[in-house]
Image (cartoon, rainbow, N blue to C red):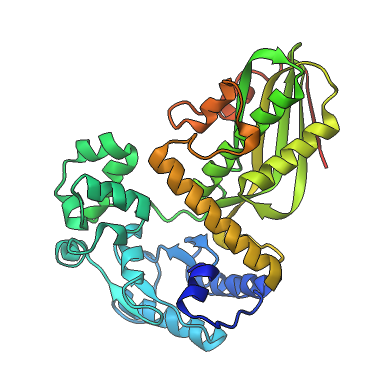
Amino acid sequence: MPLWEAEKACPGLLVRPPNFERYREMSKRIFDILYSYTPLVEPVSIDEGFMDVTDVHFEGRHGLDLAQQIQDHIFQELHLPSSIGVAPNKFLAKMASDMKKPMGISVLRKRQVEDILWPMKAVEMHGIGQKTADKLSRLGFFTIGDIANGDPSFLEEKFGVAGRQMHNKAHGIDFRAVDPESIHDFKSIGNSTTLPRDTANKQEIIRVLRNLSDSVSRRLKRKDVYAGNIQLTIRYYDRKTITRSRKLSYPVDGTDAIYEQAKALFDQYWNGRTVRLLGVTGMDLVQKGFAVKPLDLFNYAEDEKHDRLQSLIGEVRSRFGEGALLKGTQIGGASYSDQLRDKKGRGTSLEKDFLRGSIGKEEVEDDSE
């Protein structure tokens, strides 16, 4: 629950500054306990992870016994409650773990899916947020059972690959393996765009940087990750390309923060020559639950207000279109980079547009601060 919601629900709420170093320390100790049982541990946030205990030998004859042993271990060593879901796959384990919080153990078998999961609201399915639930309800899907009994081709048409995945999960099907390396699967998220004409007009360039930053921000948020490093790519009219990056004091995912760094890099390294391509990339990605930002009570409250505003902007854009709410620097004559705000016309990623076949064909300079 965001701070502003908590204060609204409980006027006079006493708010203490967060102690992120303490949280990280306890998270490490929790996962150390999990690793003591099996190396097949997949962290998904600062306080949540999956374990594959198929080959673990333990005292007891049932997975429930091992779950109880792990729960007792965490509580006795760290004095922290934990909820555990025991199931044949990751999706069902996650659904089970949410059933008895904060100190419960639940077992969920595939044969129980119809009785236990199908009556639940669609928004209660792991992986379905409020916006997706709203869209599902407009299409006549109100419960997990509705999704299970729906046409998978129709769901895929409306939601892409995620639609078919929803249908599978509603039947208790999830083939994903517990992958200890999955948190490191992708190293960066970026967008680049080739300008319709070479330009040295700084106002046009700044507008492109703003749109690129906005696109990267939205992709970071969809992946639930923050960037600890911002990289700028400039390709000049003669195809000479430079990349410059800046390590941040704390990870970010907001448009303004990304744009601020990208513009600072551009102001510092642009040599005034005409530009053909621009790219902005978030690197050193950190899973949302593991991101640490130094806060005090004053800027914590301001950040909550900013997050609430960004959430509202996102809702307006989703309902009325990407161009419904824009920064002043994004407004002007028609620009190719405006397509970065269009879900059907986003710019290409740096990996596809810049790196593919470009190294070795042009002069590339790379530097980091």
Viewer can see residue 234? yes
Q: State the count of labels.
A: 0
Using the image as rendered, state which of residue 23 and residue 339 is in the foreground: 339
Identify the residue at image location x=54%, y=54%: 309
Residue 92 or 156: which is nearer the viewer?
156
Q: Is residue 181 left or right of residue 147?
A: right
To which quarter of the image does residue 128 belong? bottom left
Q: Who's the residue at 41% across and 80% down the image?
A: 102
Q: Is residue 129 visible?
A: no
Work out whether 51 lies above or below 77.
above
Q: Does 218 sit above or below residue 308?
A: above
Q: In the picture, residue 12 is in which quadrant?
A: bottom right
Percent coordinates x, y for residue 237 in the rendering: 74, 12
Question: Is residue 281 found left or right of 366 in the rendered image?
Answer: left
Which residue corresponds to the image point at 53% horizontal and 43% vertical from the top-left? 218
| Residue in the foreground of this view, choosing between 12 and 44 | 12
**x then y, percent, for residue 1:** 47, 69
Above or below 213: residue 133: below
Figure quadrant of the C terminus:
top right
Image coordinates for residue 227, horizontal then vertical, percent: 64, 48
Question: Which residue is pictured at 65% across the width and 28% down the height?
Answer: 208
Q: Position of residue 124 (x, y in %)?
A: 30, 62
Q: Is residue 22 left or right of residue 102?
A: right
